[in-house]
Image: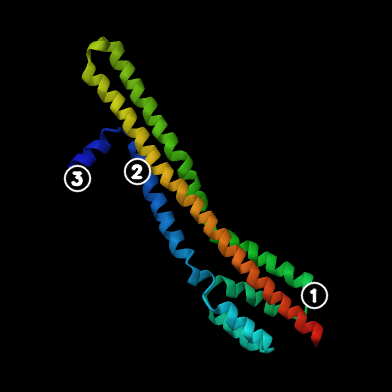
Amino acid sequence: MSDVLDFLVSGGPVMVPIGLSSVVAMAALMERVVALRGSRIVPQGFAVEVTELLNQGRYPDALTLCRKSESVVARVVEVAIVARGHTRAEIKERLEEIGRREAAELERYSQVLGTIASVAPLLGLLGTVWGMILTFEVIQEQGLGGVGNLAGGISQALITTMAGLSVGIPTLIAYKWVLSRADDLVLEMEEISLSVLDKLIDAEDAA
C-alpha cells in the first residue's frame, strides 16, 4: 500500500486534481447506475397493467395506478390520462413537454462524466509538461551527468500521463454508457406514452 502511495506521490502536485477527478467520476457513475435502474424508470409490467385498465375504460383506476407508482413512466402516462378529452395534438404536446423534462433528469450528471473524461488526460499532459520542465532545469544546472535527477523528472512526467489516461478512458466509457442507457429508457417511455395516447384517442373517437 505504501509503495502505491509513494508511486502516486512521485507524480507531483498534478496527481491531486487527477485523484479528485477520479473520485467525482466514480460518485457520479454510481449515482447514475442507481438512478437509471429499469425498475425506477419503466417498471416491469406497468405498461401491461395500465394498458389493460385503459382497454376496459377504467380511467380513474389507471390514474390511481400512475399516482401510486413512483416511476418516471407513470408520471408521463399520468399527464396523458389527465389530458383525456383534448385533441391528439394537445395531449402529444403535453407528453413532449414532460418527456423533455424527464429526459433531462435521466441525463443528469452525465456532463460531469463528460467533462472529467476530457479534463483528466489534459491534467496528465500538464503533469508531463511539468516533469519535462524539471528535467530540462536539471540539465541546465548539472548538465547531462545527473542521470538520477533526469530519470526522476521523466518518471514524474510518465506517471501523470498514465494517471490522466487511467482516469479519462474509463470515465469516457462511463459517460457513453450513461447517455446510451438514458436514450434507451427515453425511447421505451416514448413507445409506452404513444401507445397510451393512441388508446385514449381511439376511445374518444368510439364514444
Q: How is the image coloured?
A: rainbow
Question: How far across and down, in percent of the image, does residue 45 sit?
Answer: 54, 79
Apparent side of residue 46 relative to residue 19 in the rendered image (left or right): right
Q: Quadrant of the C terminus?
A: bottom right
Residue depicted at 67% across the width and 89% down the height? 56
Which residue is the extreme one toward the top? Answer: 143
- Depth check, mark 2 against mark 3: the one in front is 3
The answer to whether residue 109 is seen in the rendering is no
Residue 87, numbered circle: 1
Q: Badge 3 is on which residue?
A: 1
Apparent side of residue 169 relative to residue 187 in the rendered image (left or right): left
Q: Badge 2 is on which residue?
A: 19
Instruction: Tell me which numbered mark, 2 or 3, is placed earlier along the sequence.
Output: 3
Distance, label 2 to label 1, CA atoms, is 54 Å
Distance, label 2 to label 3, CA atoms, is 16 Å
Label 2: element kind: helix
Q: Residues within 10 Å of mark 2 (few under 14, many from 20)?
A: some
- Up the image or down, 41 lies above or below 17; here it is below
Q: Quadrant of the N terminus?
A: top left
Q: Residues within 10 Å of mark 1 (few under 14, many from 20)?
A: few
* In contact (CB < 8 Å): disc 2 and disc 1: no
